[in-house]
Amino acid sequence: MTGATGSGKSTTLAAMIRHFNDSEEGHIVTIEDPIEFIHRENKSIIHQRLVGPDNDTPTFLDGVEDAMRQAPDIILLGEVRDKETMTAALQAAETGHLVFCTLHTRDAPTTMQRVLGFYGAGEKESVRHQFANSLVAIISQQLVKRTQPDKQGRMRQLIMEVLQPNMGVRSIMRDETKAIQLIRDAQKSSGDLGNVTMDDQLILAAQQGVISNEQAMSRSIMRETVEKGLKDGRVGRTA
């Protein structure tokens, strides 16, 4: 789950945890700093741990290592801040755990770049394979000023990008000779999986009058793409 501070990442993750808790039996461990949402157990057992020297666990890495000894079905990491935590998250995912993480990136390609950026040149190849093999989805989001309030009186609109990798995307992620930006093209051509790009969703929201053209362009990943889409009156291929 990626996006800038204040983009609603924690709220979306809390909704996912609540859905699992309400519908499945399992063990959920959250490792957070701070804990923003308190979850009450329903069908699942939930342990929430606060990170800090005098709190439940001193670091995110310690929290993951401790959680792995407690047979969790889901591990939620409030934030990945360093290489060690990223490595622990990847290892947990490889062993069959569903791991939720957050990063301060704007879209899927830059998320891949950020993950690789934690590692040195000699480590990137193995990390590429780990990430490509274990990734379930990258969800990036922003909250954009609306042209008018919605039915609940809210003045911000959620704009969300989704990448659920197919075999083609995983192949791009594994191959260091392929530009990471190729992920964008693959994402746009696999809308049948539910994949959408941030720029296309901004264009669509502007066309529907939910946000202004100026907001769409100012929040775009590639301004020229959004500007052209608004001018042409159509959204790029997402299905």
Image: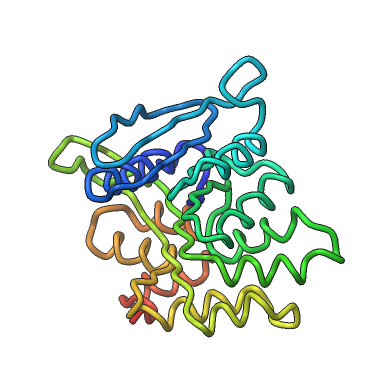
Q: At 48% from the left edge and 72% from the top edge, which residue is drawn?
A: 225
- The location of residue 91, given as percent across then percent down, is 64, 56
- 131 left or right, relative to 77: right
Depth check: give the residue in front, 43 or 229. Answer: 43
Left-right relation of 146 to 69: left
Query: Quadrant of residue 123 in the image?
Result: bottom right
Q: Quadrant of the C terminus?
A: bottom left
Image location of residue 227, percent across then percent down: 45, 68
- Is residue 171 found left or right of 144 in the rendered image? right
What is the count of numbered marks?
A: 0
- Residue closest to the far top: 54
Task: Give the camera-side residue of 135 and 140.
Answer: 135
Going by the picture, which residue comes out furthest to the left?
151
Which of 223 and 81 lies nearest the eye of the viewer?
81
Percent from the top left, x then y, of residue 154? 23, 37
Say which residue appears at 43% left-offset and 50% top-offset. Answer: 73
The residue located at (65%, 67%) in the rendering is 130
Picture coordinates of residue 96, whole percent (x, y) = 51, 60
Identify the residue shown where x is 53% and y is 65%.
135
Q: Is residue 6 above or below residue 221?
A: above
Report the colour scheme: rainbow
| Viewer-side residue, 221 vs 185 | 185
Describe residue 46's horizontal placement relative to residue 102 as left or right.
Answer: left
